[in-house]
Image: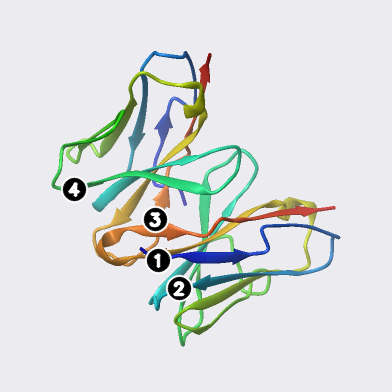
Amino acid sequence: SQQGEEDPQALSIQEGENATMNCSYKTSINNLQWYRQNSGRGLVHLILIRSNEREKHSGRLRVTLDTSKKSSSLLITASRAADTASYFCATADISGNTPLVFGKGTRLSVIA
Amino acid sequence: SAVISQKPSRDICQRGTSLTIQCQVDSQVTMMFWYRQQPGQSLTLIATANQGSEATYESGFVIDKFPISRPNLTFSTLTVSNMSPEDSSIYLCSVADRGYGYTFGSGTRLTVV
């Protein structure tokens, strides 16, 4: 079953703008990960943030994690048309070696 | 990190038939996970496959419909049995790498007609 909700479900922005996606989860986690998927193709791992981390950067990506609120956000700065994809958060259980539980995802459209 | 070879990448099947999807991992892993992604939806866990024991299925998924084999630590298959158009989805396998990273197969896009 899905871990939680992501919002917005769909987001449309102009190229160059920033895109922010949010994710909430329900249980205690070891880490939270964000993935991208282009048009129903394979998953691309973007970034992993551990439960003891609050913020992490990778290129144009910035992820925050608030374990007290059980929520995370993914910020993509200076978006490009190539960023158009579905973005999913996924949580790994605190016990480890268990399957990832995925959020419902955000469909991002970046208009050139 | 582990590399997974998943086959087939896509197939179009007649209703009532079965399709077996294979995942080969380039290293030994304890657990493999199978997911289904219905059109426009997120990934839903079907089952966890442990080598040497029966797979553990999530609510809504049964062994008769989705039998899984796990003959060794590098290989697993998922069969979609007695298919109907509602089974049209992308099916993905996944493994947990050390350090809580995860690797996914490239997916099998199944269309049932």
Q: Nearer the viewer, residue B68 or B21?
A: B21
Mark 3 to mark 2 CA distance (whole Å): 20 Å
**In the figure, A68 relative to A102: above or below?**
above
Mark 3 to mark 1 CA distance (whole Å): 16 Å
> Residues at badges 1 and 4 in contact (C-beta under 8 Å)?
no
> Residues at badges 1 and 2 in contact (C-beta under 8 Å)?
yes
Mark 3 to mark 4 CA distance (whole Å): 15 Å
Camera-near label (3 vs 1) is 1
What residue is shown at x 60% (from left), y 74% (from top)? B77
What residue is shown at x 33% (from left), y 21% (from top)? A77
Identify the amino acid type marked 2: Asp
Q: Are marks 3 and 4 on the same chain?
A: yes
Q: Is residue B107 left or right of residue B2?
A: right
The residue wearing badge 2 is B26
The residue wearing badge 4 is A51
SS at badge 2: loop
Camera-near label (3 vs 2) is 2
SS at badge 1: loop
Camera-near label (1 vs 4) is 1
Chain label for disc 3: A
Identify the amino acid type marked 1: Ala
